[in-house]
Amino acid sequence: MEYETISKPDVDSLAVRPNLDDYEGIRSGFDYERVIDELDGLPGGGLNIAYECLDRHVAAGRGDKACILWDGKDGRQETYTYADMAKLSNQFANVLRKLEVEKGSRVFVFMDRIPELYAAAFGTLKAGCIIGPLFSAFGPDAIKDRLEDSGASVLVTTPELKAKVHEIRGDLPALKHLIIASHNEPPEVDDGELSWNDLMADASEEFDIVQTAPDDPAIMHYTSGTTGRPKGALHVHKAVLGHYATGKYVLDFHEDDIYWCTADPGWVTGTSYGMFAPCTNGVSSVIYEGGFSASKWYEVIQKYKVTVWYTAPTAIRMLMKAGDEVPKKFDLSTLRYTMSVGEPLNPEAVVWSEKAIGLPFHDNWWQTETGSIMIANYPVMPIKPGSMGRPMPGINPGIIDEEGNEVATGEEGDLAVRPGWPSMFRTYWNREEMYDSRFKNGWYITGDRARKDADGYFWFVGRADDVINTAGHLVGPFEVESALLEHPAVAEAGVIGKPDPVAMEIVKAFVSLKEGYEPTDELKRELRRFSRERLGPGIAPREIDFIDTLPKTRSGKIMRRLLKARELGLDEGDTSTLEDD
Ligand code: AMP
């Protein structure tokens, strides 16, 4: 079905004049290197994301402004100013110094969205260390893979989550310090643990930020590929230019905005756009600790008078499912701009949101590796529902063929971007070869398939690989298969993404059993429970089917493509490399 283009709004009719009020004009004169002129740089030289996010506002007399409006799961509401966050992060940087954690060390956080998470992340950056955020829903296997690969020496977690860490701590010789933080009572700590509260109580609120250079590593996020375990995409302090500029031009931040990004910092959106973009632009951000509920979410917008809202298609589809009557019960009139990222945003969702909340969602596209938004819909441009929009100023994407040459307008190909933007990842941790393999003929290959139309709008087609996108989160089939194989009953496992109306895809596993095991419903439930415990609910398979043998290539690789075609009743395509059939 064709959806009508939503026409370009009259700029003067908008609540505020968009920062990007002239797309062509700003794009043609844009130079990412000059964005630094709008930031401050470290007083003694160098560049540090945390300084640009916090201390520069304090230095300019804006320290009293609310940085975080925290809404706890238990209903507590707390405000942290820019000055508060600068001090808390200084304290944590001092903690790291006292523990003799050296520049470049990996410091991971495995916690819910409590204020300590943000203090730890900014403090880590100030100490010149690399911050690695993990989803609190991860199970022990998922944590172990990431901590082992990164060689993290510090992990900050909470009393509620630490049992999962203890299960695997013996496998992590590099992990020297386990810090337990609580936003309730000071935590009781056991042997081998340190108390956040004790460490912070002894730490000064003053800290001279380590003189990080623009190209010094700052943050790493693990992301899934088709083969192998998740890999750590490494970003540098210079990425802050991308966070700031996209915050200004895509999220359209203005001084008085109250902004809400619903993403968890375990996902790159929750750091680039849950922390760095709003803070560098000096706006106030709502941090909502709770999970999804349509009425709770609308209530958050009403309670905090949210003006700019950034969320994801799965959440929007769940809001749609909850019905049009729910938003009517709340005052959402403060909202002026809404955006979405992470998966294809169905055109119906754009049309629905215009009707139900009075504003269309603006889709944008980027990924862990790109570090900041690459393609977007902007306030001053017509929206073609279903399209990801047009390139951010300073970004040059293209659609290319296998040789790395651009294809004709309207043709499908690999979505690629000309390298060199500031927030581009600099390597996959310990996997330089894999990093190199992502570049071809002067392009960075994103792993997505797309098309570009005659107006320069990009349209997402699908993934070029077997990576599963479930509720906006990428899941690598290999990680799930490996966890299933740890179960004594499992001989082989093949994992695919099965289309789902709400989550876009769900993780589905095909399992063949070892001799002596019966394919019962009880075993199915046991395998689901087993993988949920090992990996966490976001990664573990929602569906499992037993199968006698898995289709494999002659070289022994499981043919997930074929499993998927069979599951969907589609043409099985080229099966000439199949082992036997
Ligand atoms: P991640 O690195 O986990 O943020 O996932 C990035 C991937 O999510 C992209 O490579 C796409 O496959 C998908 N994705 C992100 N944004 C969009 C979008 N607006 N439309 C379609 N797919 C998207």
Image (cartoon, helix red, strand yellow):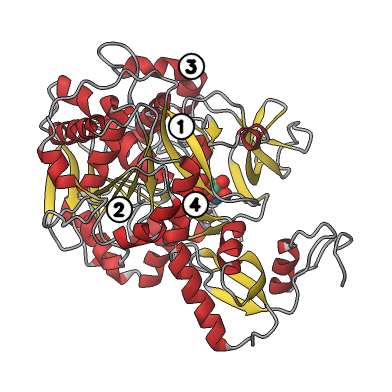
Front of the two marks 1 and 4: 4
Q: Which residue is mark 1?
A: 235
Residue type for callout 2: Met
Q: Residues within 10 Å of mark 4 (few under 14, many from 20)?
A: some
Secondary structure beneath disc 4?
Answer: helix
Q: Residues within 10 Å of mark 2 (few under 14, many from 20)?
A: many
Q: Which residue is mark 3?
A: 29
Q: Which residue is mark 4?
A: 145
Front of the two marks 2 and 3: 2
Viewer-side residue, 172 vs 256? 172
Check the image and report above or below for 241 versus 269. above
Image location of residue 71, percent across then percent down: 18, 54
Front of the two marks 3 and 1: 1
Q: State how far apart marks 1 and 2 are (Cα).
A: 21 Å
Q: Residues within 10 Å of mark 1 (few under 14, many from 20)?
A: many
Instruction: Work out whether mark 2 precedes mark 3 in sequence or the reverse, and give the earlier one.
Output: 3
Horizontal placement of 197 versus 18: left or right?
left
Q: State how far apart marks 4 and 2 are (Cα).
A: 17 Å
